[in-house]
Image: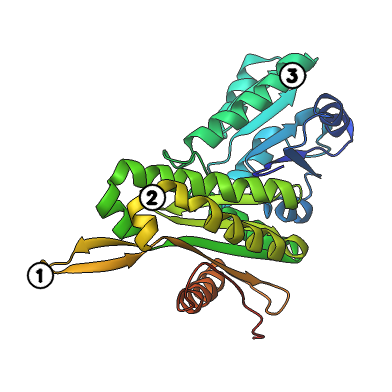
Amino acid sequence: MINTKYIVLVDDTNQLCNIVNKIFARESNYEFFTSTSDRTELRKALLTIPDLIIVNEDGLKEDSAATVCKYIKKNKENNITPIIVTSSIKIEEHRVDVLKSGVEYYIVKPLNEQYFYYTIKNLSHLIASNRCLSALTGLPGNLQIDNEMKRRIASKKLFAILYADLDNFKSYNDKYGFMNGDEVIKYTATLIKNHIQKYGSKGDFLGHIGGDDFVAIVDYENAKKIGRMIVKEFDKEIKAFYSEEDLRIGSIRLPNRKGRIEKYPIMTLTVAMISNRYKPYSSTLEIGEDGAAVKKKAKMIPGSTFLEDRRRN
């Protein structure tokens, strides 16, 4: 499932984990990480940069929920991540103290499974809606892209990043107008998403940097097939966005700044791939630099292009 929601469960027992596994058994786009309140283990779990954190106060052996939540909020990557606390303590003063620690929801036990399920699901949806989603494509923006890269770096697993953007998009926009240009961007987003869902794995991610730039973060073993199939289908389908006259002559004709008519090619798509198979990454800055370099090289190749970076260190 594309764009998985990551949720950390903090519980020194298995009680919360058992409940969540039961009520989310049929949900494939949620991934749960369990952690005790031990600071070393909790710090490791927070490296996933979750979309939501749930703390089972009854399952904490030593700390109170407020203490654990204050610790979580000190983590700069998770200081705005929503927290749900479940507890059998019904004393109003205690509930207020927990909420003062930055907790969004305090749910009193015994848990109503339906209520708990929809609280998690609706809060996750609200977070996704408010986190800088692209208004045009509905895809996650730069904040989520950065977070997903950090998750992959922390996981130490093989991953690949596909940078995709359109070539000669500006000339198309100038000729056909921004509304038609928006349709091309939406088409490209759908094209990439469809191929990730067809050839990818659970946990794959697709983000919209802005304009005609996209980033997909997928398992390494599937990346090349996804990239090549995206490029192949794009060349077939992009013709539907041009007039018969432009397709006949194979270009767009537009006046330049001096009023002279120039020819601009039919749009193509560049997909540049980098991975941690050949070079280990420790920061999103390194990923961004290599991605930009490979994309620049790929754009020098005529036509739609898929290019994998195999440089080592």
Q: Is residue 26 left or right of residue 43?
A: right
- Dot 3 or dot 2: first in sequence order is 3
For disc 3, the marked residue is 89
Residue type at the position of mark 1: Lys
For disc 1, the marked residue is 258
Residue type at the position of mark 3: Ile
- Dot 3 or dot 1: first in sequence order is 3
| 3 or 2: mark nearer the eye | 2
Query: Which x, y percent locates residue 26?
Result: 82, 28
Q: Nearer the viewer, residue 60 or 83?
A: 83
The relative height of residue 137 versus residue 306 in the rendered view (above or below) is above
How packed is label 3: few (under 14 Cα within 10 Å), some, or many (20 or more)? Answer: few
Q: Is residue 140 visible in this depiction of the protein?
A: no
Residue type at the position of mark 2: Tyr
For disc 2, the marked residue is 242
| 3 or 1: mark nearer the eye | 1
* Identity of the residue drawn at 59% across and 35% down: 82
Q: Quadrant of residue 274?
A: bottom right
The relative height of residue 54 versus residue 269 in the rendered view (above or below) is above
